[in-house]
Amino acid sequence: MLRGSNRFARTGFSSRRLREAMKTRLRLIAYTTSFALCFLNGWAGDSRPTSEFTTTDPAKVKIIEDSSREKHPEIDHFKHLCPGFGGYAVIHEGGDARSWINLKFDGKITDLAGDTLSACPGQFPAKANNVVEWRGLRKDRSFVPYAIIYRMMSSSGDDKPTRIETLIIIKLDGKNSRVAGHVAGVEGNEKAEELADRLCR
C-alpha cells in the first residue's frame, strides 16, 4: 500500500507539473501572438482616416509681412508662415478685408487664392478662425496627410448682411495641390470630412 501510494503521489505531482508547464507555454504563445499583431498593425498603419490640427494664430506663427506693423500702410495686408504636416507649410495671406491660405511644399508656393475666393458666396470672404484641419492616415507611426479643410466666412450683399460660412477642401498633391471642393458651413465638418476622404484620399 505504501509503494502504491508513493507511485500515485509521484504521478499526481508529475501531472501537476505538466499542467503548469502547458499553462505557461500557452500564456507565452498568447503573449507572443498579441505582440506580433500589435507590431504588424503599427508597421502597416491604420487605414482609417483621421484628423490633426494646426493653427494660423498670429501669436503662434512666423510673420512674413503685416500692415499692422507698418506706420502708414496703403491697404491692409498680411502674410504669415504657419506650421503643417507632411512637408507642407501653410501661408495665411490676405488683404483688403479678404484672406485665404496658400501652401508651400519643397520650396514652391501653390497659389490657391482664386479658387478659394470663388468658392465662397457673398462679399469679402476671409478665413473664419485660426483652425486648419488636416485629413490623413497613420503610417509607420507618422501622420500622412492627403487633404486640408478650413472654414471661410463672407457676408451677404443685401440691406441686412448675414454671415455665410463655407468649408474649403484642398487636395494635397505637392506643387499640384488644389481646391478640390467646398461644403456650406451649415452642413458641418463631418460632411466636409466625408467629401475630403472621397475626393482626396
Image: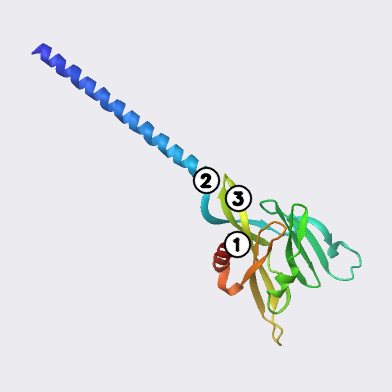
Amino acid of disc 1:
Cys
Q: Which mark is residue 200?
A: 1
| Residues tagged 3 and 2 counted as in contact (Cβ below 8 A) | no
- Residue occupying image coordinates x 23% and y 20%: 14
Sequence order check: which comes first, mark 2 or mark 1? 2
- Given this view, does label 3 or label 1 mark the residue nearer the observer? 1
Q: Residues within 10 Å of mark 2 (few under 14, many from 20)?
A: few
Viewer-nearest residue: 167 or 130: 167
Q: Residues under labels 3 and 2: Cα distance? A: 13 Å
Quadrant of the image containing the N terminus? top left
Q: Residues under labels 2 and 1: Cα distance? A: 20 Å
| Residue of label 2 | 44
Amino acid of disc 2:
Ala
Locate residue 99, reporting x and y percent. Answer: 75, 68
- Residue occupying image coordinates x 83% and y 67%: 77
Amino acid of disc 3:
Phe
| Residue of label 3 | 143
Q: Quadrant of residue 62?
A: bottom right
Label 2: state its secondary structure.
helix
Q: Residue furthest top?
A: 3
Sequence order check: which comes first, mark 3 or mark 1? 3
Quadrant of the image containing the C terminus? bottom right
Q: Image check: 188 left or right of 175? A: left
